[in-house]
Amino acid sequence: MNRIVGLNLLLMMLCTILAAGEYHVSVRGSDANEGSPARPFKTIQAAAIRALPGDTITVHAGTYRERVNPLRGGVSDDRRIVYRAAAGEIVHIKGSEVIVKWTRVKNGVWKKTLANTFFGDYNPYKDLIYGDWFYDHGRPHHTGEIFLNGKSLYEVESLDKVMNPAPLADAQDQEGSTYVWYCESDDAQTTLWANFHSHQPNKELVEITVRPCCFYPEKTGIHYLTIRGFHMSQAATQWAPPTAEQPGLIGTNWSKGWIIEHNVISDSKCSGITLGKDRSTSQNAWLADPSKDGSQHYNETIFKALRAGWNRENIGSHIVRHNTIYNCEQTGLCGSLGAVFSQIYGNHIYNIWSKRQFGGAELAGIKIHAAIDVVIRNNRIHNTCRGLWMDWMAQGAQILANLLYDNYSEDLFLEVNHGPYLVCNNIMLSPRAIFNMSQGGAFVHNLITGRIYIRPEPNRFTPYHFPHSTDVAGLITILNGDDRYFNNLFSPDSSCDNKVIAPNTQTPPHLLKYRFSLQQYATARWPVNMASNLYLLGYQPYGQETNSLENRTLNPAIRLEDRGETVYLHLTADPSFEIKTQLVTSRLLGKTKMADAAFENPDGSDLIIDWDYFAKRRSSTSPRVGPFEELVEGEQSLRVW
């Protein structure tokens, strides 16, 4: 009997494998076809309607102006639905349409009127950006956008500003900010005005965003998808706060097990990739009820999500790897609650919030609420507002071997977390390296040239969890401390004094005197543990450390050379880099005070930091200070990307 059951199971498995199919899509196809190589579909959505677990959708070269709404997902890692660009072919998915037949108004100003039926059921030129923690700076902002030859124009709030454009003071591209547009819309039509300067819009490529996303399921619970190798751009995305559904140019919409890899993602009005919350557990709760504080609303959202099935079995465990993400005005990647247990690695994220027409408390290269057991490693993040922002519940998070530089506010903001979380082998070169409004962290083998600021948050209660779980164990405020610093290299960048730090994140006046110093931990409520750190050129230690060393004479001449596709770090080492250290392990780091949880890997195994930035083996007895194990004395150049 058991043999018969076994044979039946084997036959079922074989049938499943044989049943897995492949659908082809081509711009020269037809949705009336069957999706074979000889008779491909014309749209990706036609294949998405038919795809079943185990199937692959192969999309061939061309531009697809559509929103892909996957109707179903896979059922496991082994039986996922794969969306992929054909090998060696360039496939664009765009949330925009080409607009022709512009009418000249005067000088460089042109006009286009469109019937509202052109937009179907979504008109981005009627849809204003809004949401919790969004700052409009006193003027309207639409989700729509106009592009000239692939470059976005700047929206202005009056027709007069189209006729008489002036540079936007905060924009990084001053000349580009004078290419502006304005819209008006009534019940019947939408009119766009744009100042193209000397360009002729009827002879060049002009596109406008008309879709709220490029790849995003309407339904939640669409699990186990792979999206590979696409160029996705120009989506009219809405603001994505933690208390609302978080739409992105591509987003998982409250699901599990996606793999998003080897894509180029750009020009989202707000966020590029979202691993975020659903709509049912709250939708801009603070705007809906301002009588309660925003943090109270978010705590309520968390407990609603728990009752709705927020756990490892249903949500998260995504992989986001080897993507290039740029030109997004909120985040490159964000996720509230939905990113738990995920891995984010090998991504290049830059030019986030570079137009700076609006603001808010959600601006970062990567912004995650509830980074529970999330691993963020080997990413290159630069020219953003904040590089990494771990906001609430970064318990078990590991931030490993990331390259962070030229970020406007800081490289890493840790907001109201209770640990344990690990920050290890990172290169942090922005004027402000870390803004720490948390407790229970371990900072190990990092290279830090910017300021570190420590601030308590005694009036905000935030959750901590049982280890490796979304289940809430309790709530407590932030009194600072309970941190560990081992084997780090600190060397102040003197040019920091000439660089601007974001005005909305200015350091409290009582901390300004510390500049490059860890002495501010003297006022922390909980004890800290620091040892074997190297402080150069006057960067000041905590003062109660063992085996740490100050060298006020060595100038390591740390300099980053950004060559575009590659990045080199130049520095000088001397014998002071040979300070006495020890291998950092779970045993050395111990447990955090609030969560009573050990520093360990997401799978519960012991942590042993015996590898460096390049994944090379470290000495088991006296590992080198900083992120690089194989430094030599003297000047050297290291390729770090």
Image: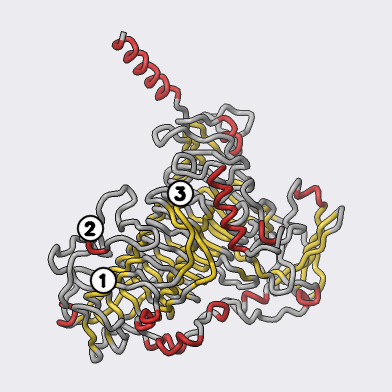
Q: Residues within 10 Å of mark 3 (few under 14, many from 20)?
A: many
Query: Which quarter of the picture shows residue 194?
Result: bottom right
Pick whichever of labels 3 and 2 is earlier in the sequence: 3
Which of labels 3 and 2 is toward the front? 3
Residue at left offset 32%, top offset 64%: 401
Left or right: 630, with 460 as reference point: left
Mark nearer the N terminus (3 vs 1): 3
Q: Is mark 3 on a helix, strand or loop?
A: loop
- Label 1 neighbourhood size at 10 Å, few (<14), some (14-19), many (20+)? many
**Mark 3–mark 1 distance (CA, rounded to whole Å):** 29 Å
- Image marks 2 and 1: residues in contact by CB distance under 8 Å: no
User: Toward the viewer: 310 or 625?
Assistant: 310
The spot of residue 424 in percent (x, y) is: 31, 65
Q: Nearer the viewer, residue 427 or 184?
A: 427
Label 2 neighbour load within 10 Å: few <14, some 14-19, many 20+: some
User: Quick one: which residue is furthest to the left in this view?
Assistant: 621
Rendered position, 441 above or below 123: below
Q: Mark 1 points at which residue?
A: 486
Question: At 31% across and 74% down in the image, what residue appears?
Answer: 447
Q: Name the residue tied to disc 3.
A: 470
Q: What is the C-alpha distance between the residues marked 2 and 1?
A: 13 Å
Residue picked out by circle 2: 608
263 left or right of 573 in image: right
